[in-house]
Image (cartoon, helix red, strand yellow):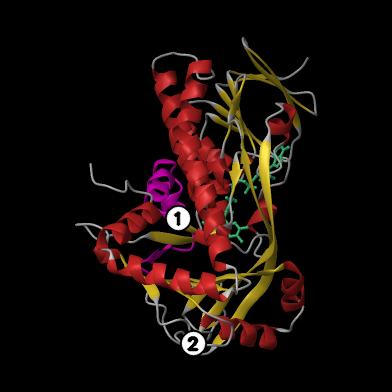
């Protein structure tokens, strides 16, 4: 006899977006099936993913509500200051720069965000999934979904069948569910690659995040807490770097030995952290952006990178995905509480209305910032420096940028 399961929602993809949504829904008593094509425990391996996420205040609250924040094994490191500068490789950065101090953002100073290791979040999710009786995990597993006005049937390749009211595509940027639904997307190739690794440095980072714009792309140094498996006797001061380069040059930098790689990184970073050393391995991520024209279809909602993937220039990709999760979870939890249909056309239209404009704005902003800064044209550089200087002097505009980066409303109330 075919094994049958009936749940309210079925989430495809147990990445940070799908996994967090599953925990959030299950902790509110909404039953979910969570399916990932990959095996999840190997994702905890240090060699799997070198990313660290800059998590905004709103995203932190979501992780708390989902029961994930308190079980992060490496404590999240606060970002209290952000310095944005531009320049050229090997030269001192331009005198004109933006400095964001968290104390200027509002009456109650709190950090702009927190740096969280991707691996630490993965471990927290893997530990949390089995603690929810209402969360049914299938991984590794492949599945196909049939959706109709009356409901959905998800068939796993081993013959098991799941019935639900709503399917959520959280399968990342190449979402098969999105393609099957015929949802059109706009893509932007960048011909840039992000090199990601951790560095140990001589001087403390003082919770400062640095974004240094260079002609080939931005170079970011982000303050991290020392990792639990830091080398004994090594420096306690650690940062994550996200170094964007033209793809052909990135390949050459990736091939350098650690010493030469660290020297090249130091030429872009500047002297404020003292001597630096690469810790562990390096990763490279080819960059592109993508945005879906619709987020919903019959009993289907897209969330996270399945709906929008943006340039990592502002470290906002996952924060946008988490804002999708907050909006969708609130609608689903409220509908479930009142015994309404969680996959209704009305609910899905509301989800799209709430999320599309916000995501589109960030998509355009990150693309625009990359174009504005990743150039060596003198006239563009001069105009941009004027703009940086002007924003640094305008308290209202600075405050608005800061609150947006924190994921809180741009104006109070
Ligand atoms: C270099 C770099 C740095 C970044 N830094 C930041 C940052 O500082 N802050 C920030 O907010 N964001 C950042 N981002 C963006 C962030 O990494 C992504 O937005 C985030 O990973 C998206 O999560 P997701 O769960 O939507 O998708 P993914 O992480 O892609 O996860 C998708 C999951 O779905 C599974 N899957 C795929 N296909 C199927 C299928 N057919 N069936 C079942 N399962 C499937 C996959 O196995 C995977 O587990 C960065 C990105 C890059 C490249």
- The relative height of residue 105 versus residue 412 in the rendered view (above or below) is below
Identify residue for label 1. Answer: 55
Indicate yes or no whether the magenta region holds residue 68.
yes
Q: Which residues are magenta?
A: 56-82
Mark 2 residue element: loop
Residue visible at 54% across and 67% down?
373
Q: Is mark 1 within 8 Å of ligand 1?
A: yes
- Neighbor class of circle 1 (other Cα within 10 Å; few <14, some 14-19, many 20+) is many
Give the number of the mark in front: 2 or 1: 2
Residue 380 is one of the magenta-drawn residues: no
Q: Is residue 124 visible?
A: no
Q: Is residue 260 above or below residue 29?
A: below
- Left or right: 161 in relation to 269: right
- For mark 1, give the secondary structure: strand
Q: Write down the quadrant of residue 161 in the picture.
A: top right
Q: Nearer the viewer, residue 76 or 135?
A: 76
Left or right relative to 275: residue 43: right
Residue at x-position 44% and y-position 41%: 66
């Amino acid at each position: 006899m075919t094994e049958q399961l009936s749940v309210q929602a079925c989430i495809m993809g147990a990445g940070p977006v799908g996994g967090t949504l599953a925990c959030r829904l299950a902790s509110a008593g909404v039953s979910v099936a969570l399916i990932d094509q990959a095996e999840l425990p190997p994702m905890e391996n240090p060699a799997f993913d070198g990313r660290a996420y800059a998590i905004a205040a709103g995203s932190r609250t979501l992780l708390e509500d989902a029961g994930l924040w308190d079980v992060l094994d490496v404590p999240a490191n606060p970002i209290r200051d952000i310095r944005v500068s531009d320049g050229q490789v090997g030269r001192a950065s331009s005198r004109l720069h933006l400095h964001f101090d968290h104390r200027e953002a509002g009456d109650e100073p709190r950090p702009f965000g927190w740096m969280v290791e991707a691996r630490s979040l993965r471990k927290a999710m893997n530990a949390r999934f089995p603690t929810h009786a209402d969360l049914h995990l299938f991984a590794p597993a492949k599945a196909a979904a049939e959706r109709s006005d009356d409901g959905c049937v998800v068939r796993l390749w081993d013959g098991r069948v799941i019935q639900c009211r709503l399917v959520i595509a959280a399968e990342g940027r190449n979402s098969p569910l999105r393609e099957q639904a015929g949802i059109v997307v706009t893509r932007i190739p960048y011909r840039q690659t992000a090199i990601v690794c951790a560095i140990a440095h001589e001087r403390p980072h003082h919770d400062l995040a640095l974004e240094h714009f260079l002609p080939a792309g931005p170079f970011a140094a982000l303050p991290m807490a020392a990792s639990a498996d830091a080398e004994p006797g090594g420096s306690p001061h650690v940062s994550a770097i996200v170094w964007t380069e033209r793809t052909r040059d990135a390949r050459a930098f990736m091939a350098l030995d650690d010493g030469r790689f660290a020297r090249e990184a130091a030429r872009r970073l500047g002297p404020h952290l003292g001597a630096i050393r690469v810790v562990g391995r390096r990763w490279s991520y080819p960059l592109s952006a993508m945005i879906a024209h619709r987020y919903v279809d019959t009993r289907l909602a897209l969330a996270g990178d399945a709906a929008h993937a943006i340039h990592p220039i502002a470290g906002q990709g996952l924060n946008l995905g988490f804002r999708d999760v907050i909006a969708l979870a609130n609608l689903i939890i409220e509908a479930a509480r009142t015994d309404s249909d969680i996959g209704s056309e009305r609910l899905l239209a509301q989800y799209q209305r709430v999320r599309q404009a916000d995501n589109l704005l960030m998509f355009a902003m990150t693309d625009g910032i990359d174009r504005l800064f990743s150039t060596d044209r003198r006239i563009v550089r001069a105009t941009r420096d004027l703009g940086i200087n002007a924003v640094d002097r305008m308290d209202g505009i600075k405050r608005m940028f800061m609150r947006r980066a924190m994921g809180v409303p741009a104006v109070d109330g």
